[in-house]
Image (tube, grey):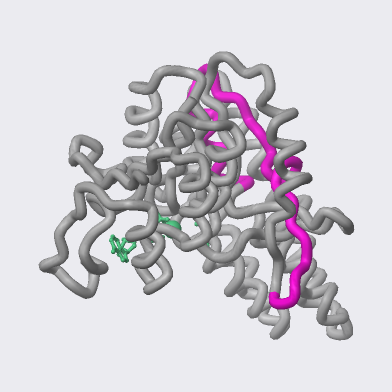
Amino acid sequence: MKVMKFGGTSVGTIESLLNLKNIVDAELKPVLVVVSAMGGFTNQLLAMCEQAQQRDISCLDTLEAARKRHHDAIDGVVVESMRKQVHATIDRFFDESLKPYYLALATNPHMPVDEIERVCDAIVAHGEILSSAIVTGMFDDGVPHLSLNLMRTMPDGSGRTLDWEETERLVKAEFSSIDKGVHVAQGFISRDTQSGAVTNLGRGGSDYTAAILASLLDAEALEIWTDVDGFMTADPRTHPDATVIPQMTYEQAQKMCDAGAKVIYPPTIAPVAMKQIPVWVKNTFNPSAPGTLIVD
Ligand code: ADP
Ligand code: ASP
Ligand code: MG
């Protein structure tokens, strides 16, 4: 089975979601699709957290605009038979979860700092929860999985690290008997092993989720679908003369990621290198471009 990760721009518009559908439809099933939040939405969720803490209720207007963006995407891409259900799911998360969380931040001036962090972590997880509901609904044979039930983190000195043992146990149990379908899971989001609180793997962490799943499931390949033609000699946004690197080693990729090549989140390489799983970096907006192959 392949693991295919689609980043924020790849799930950000109706056009890109339809590209995703074509790309996944061409695959042999089962396939595991890992998605990011719709492009820019994670930043928005966090900015609204700041606003709410400043008692700036205008964040609720931004929230309504985001709700509309998700509903528009559903109308554009979700299969007819699933549309009503996905609309209702999205509304439920906005009405029963996001809105109350923002109101709690805005109206509770004495909320302790660790409680604020807990609420903001829970809020930011909604980016991937919402986008994955849409992507699952695009496929007649879409099967949802909840990364909050699969990925486990534990506190370390400076932040959070993956609890490999517990994650392995949960992932292997979840996927032990799948034999067909388009399986969809959220990138980025996780839970603390001990407290069960919602956590995440750090900004850009959806790549890492996909690599962890690929490694634990001995996937035949990990594909990182993004908005550039492959891993390039430099960031094409700042270096228009950058060119695609057709093939590189895990070591070379790791060095470039550590040096700031944002195309792959740095912790992504190790889990797939360990199992020698080939990694492809491909362009959702130009799927016929050869992309970059990262191997031993
Ligand atoms: P996604 O949302 O798909 O995860 P990201 O924005 O995280 O996408 O990563 C893709 C972006 O990484 C590209 O749009 C590009 O501007 C940037 N980037 C930085 N360095 C490189 C590089 N060496 N090769 C390709 N893209 C790079
Ligand atoms: N949505 C998260 C972020 O914007 C994770 C990701 O896209 O990889 O950082
Ligand atoms: Mg990324």
Find out whether residue 264 is within the magenta segment.
no
* Residue 261 in picture, x, y percent from top left: 35, 67
Q: Is residue 155 magenta?
A: yes
Q: Quadrant of residue 198?
A: bottom right
Depth check: give the residue in front, 22 or 107: 22
- Spot the residue most to the left: 241
Q: Which residues are magenta?
A: 129-158
Is residue 131 positioned above or below 201 on the image? above
Residue 169 position, x and y percent, is 76, 37
> Residue at horizontal 59%, vertical 54%?
188
Q: Quadrant of ligand 1?
A: bottom left
Q: Residue at x 76, y 53 (%)?
A: 191
Q: Report the number of numbered marks.
A: 0
Residue 269 in the image, given as x and y percentages of width and height: 46, 54
Q: Quadrant of residue 259?
A: bottom left
User: Does residue 134 appear left or right of residue 8 in this picture?
Assistant: right
Q: Is residue 83 above or below residue 158?
A: above
The residue located at (49%, 25%) in the rendering is 1
Give x and y (percent) for residue 174: 71, 29
Q: Which one is in front, 124 or 189?
A: 189
- Work out whether residue 37 can be spotted: no
| Residue found at x 18% / y 55% | 244
Can residue 150 be seen here? The reply is yes
**Left or right, 120 with reference to 234:** right
| Nearest to the observer: residue 250 or residue 39 | 250
